[in-house]
Every structure is written in structure tokens, then in C-alpha cells.
Image (tube, rainbow, N blue to C red):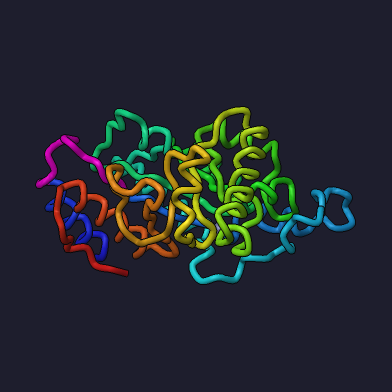
Amino acid sequence: MFDVTFSALLSAVLAAVPAGAGVHTVPILMYHMLGNAPDDAGDHDCMGKGSCRRRADHCPVPGGGVSGPGMVVAYDEFKWQMEYLRSHGWRGRTLDEIFSARPDLRPRDVVITFDDGYADNFEAFGLLREHEMKAVLFMVSDNADCQGRLSAEQLREMDAGGFRVEDHSKTHNDRFTLGTEAEQTEEYGASKKALEALLGRPVEFAAYPYGKYNVATPAVMRSLGYKASFIIGGRVADVDGDRQLVPRFRVSDRAGFLYALCEGLSAAAGKKASNCAAP
Ligand SMILES: [Zn+2]
């Protein structure tokens, strides 16, 4: 019943959208982990099997960061969402496409992003490919090859396969990301350099850990050469807006997912206020 109501609302909004003319907004979805992914336990069960990834000092504590609200979306729910996008004609875009000189944005464009680089994101990659959806991974550069996180090899494979890897700082630590201008320059400069070496291409987009930044941050990012940087914000992104403070929607359940799409269509139709029901 919810779907019927939502479809009716989408049809009403879409009727008001001139076909692709002058769209400069896009909803950006933010995910972290997938729960109960097929090999969810994989990297956590490696002790004693000789298959554990390195445990260098910079690696996060295994399982760390899992407990925050809205951090985990069930694998089956994510699968439903990707099926929904594809069957309703949505296109998953990359940031290079969205922030190009000629972005060619359409009302049913969306950017799917994941933060931090958890190992289960490799399952998301499989689903995204199956549904021909491009996406973006904001990677903490120090976490590559750590237990419970993606390996350098996986990151390269994902990047080449349309799950574009971008920057999410070196350490994910407020001590540096919210530090002085010099500290932030060192933190984001180091992750940019590490990811560029890993991927063999320029890295020009970053998401701030926890969506947090301070008065120095936007200028630091501009001077390091970032074309755009991302916060949380819970609003539709406007490519003509402040590019160092681009908002995203946190998706933790189906209602939040549908709300972001509804807001996206509403903004594409040029509406100042939407009729979308907040989750
Ligand atoms: Zn993060």
C-alpha cells in the first residue's frame, strides 16, 4: 500500500518535470555496511587460518565503528533498493559525471555512496554490477588491507568496475580532520596521495568523516585540488551550490531511501518545498 501511494506521488511529481531540461540537482545516498552479506563473517573468522589481513598499528580495531545508528542496511533490503532503482528507471552516477563541465543530469539520476570501506562492500559491488548501477566508495586510506576492510586489490577492481573509490581521510580521526589548517592539509593530502598511488589516477572528491568540518576545511580541500567534498545534511545536492559542502542522505531503511528519491524528483521539478513524507 505504501508503494502504491508513493508511486502515485512520484507520477504527480514527474508529470511536472520537463524531460531532463536544466536539472542541476541530484539525491546522494549514503550507506556504510551491509548486514548478513553472504560472506559477512569471512574476514572476522580468519584467525588461526593464516588468512588474516595485516594488523598494522594504523588499522582500526576489528569490528570498530559498527555500532552507530543507521550504519547497517540488511543485504536483502539493499538488494530490494537496487532492484527498485533499476525497475523504476534510475541511473547510478559517479561524481566525475555529476561534477563535469556538462553533467547531463536527469530527474531520475542518483549517486549511491558507501563510507569507510568495510569488507562487505564487496558484496554491494556484486549487486551494483548486477543492476548496472555505478556507485562511489569513500575510503579511509589507512584502512586498506586491514581486517574487516577492503583490500587494495578489491579497491582497484571496484574502481575499475564502476564503484569509484574516493577519499574519506587518512585516519578518520577528528584530532586531524578537525585540526588546524596545517593538520587538515596533512591528513587529506596524505589520503589523497595514498589513494592516487593505489588507483593510478587523480582523486578529486572527498567525504568528511562523520560529515564534520570546521571553518578551515573548505579552503583546505580547494587548495588540495578537490573538486567537491561531502557532508551529510539530509538534503538534495545542487551542483551549482557550495561544492565543498555537498549534502547527502543517510539511508538506514526503506522509508529513508524512498524519501531521498522523492526529494530528488521534487527538486528536479524545481519545487522549493516537497510533499515527500519524512521518514
Ligand atoms: Zn566514515
- Horizontal and vertical percent position of residue 62: 73, 62
Magenta stretch, main secondary structure class = loop
Quadrant of the image containing the N terminus: bottom left
- Which residue is at 28% across, 68% downward? 278
Q: Nearer the viewer, residue 222 or 157?
A: 222
In this orientation, does residue 222 appear?
yes
Q: Does the magenta stretch include residue 102?
A: no
Label tally: 0
Is residue 244 rendered to the left or right of residue 146? left
Is residue 153 rendered to the left or right of residue 99? right
In this orientation, does residue 38 appear?
no
- Horizontal and vertical percent position of residue 72: 53, 63
- Which residue is at 31% across, 58% downward? 235
Q: Which of 163 and 215 is in front in this view?
A: 215
Range covered by the magenta-colored residues = 15-26
Is residue 145 rendered to the left or right of residue 103? right
Q: Up-down: is 204 above or below 57?
A: above
Q: Which residue lies furthest to the left in this view?
A: 16
- Which residue is at 38% across, 58% downward? 249
Q: In which quarter of the image is residue 166?
A: top right
Quadrant of the image containing the C terminus: bottom left
- Which residue is at 68% across, 65% downward? 64
Q: Up-down: is 142 above or below 159?
A: below
Give the quadrant of ligand 1.
bottom right
Q: Nearer the viewer, residue 109 or 240?
A: 240
- Horizontal and vertical percent position of residue 212: 49, 62
Q: Up-down: is 95 above or below 180?
A: above
Q: Up-down: is 74 above or below 164?
A: below
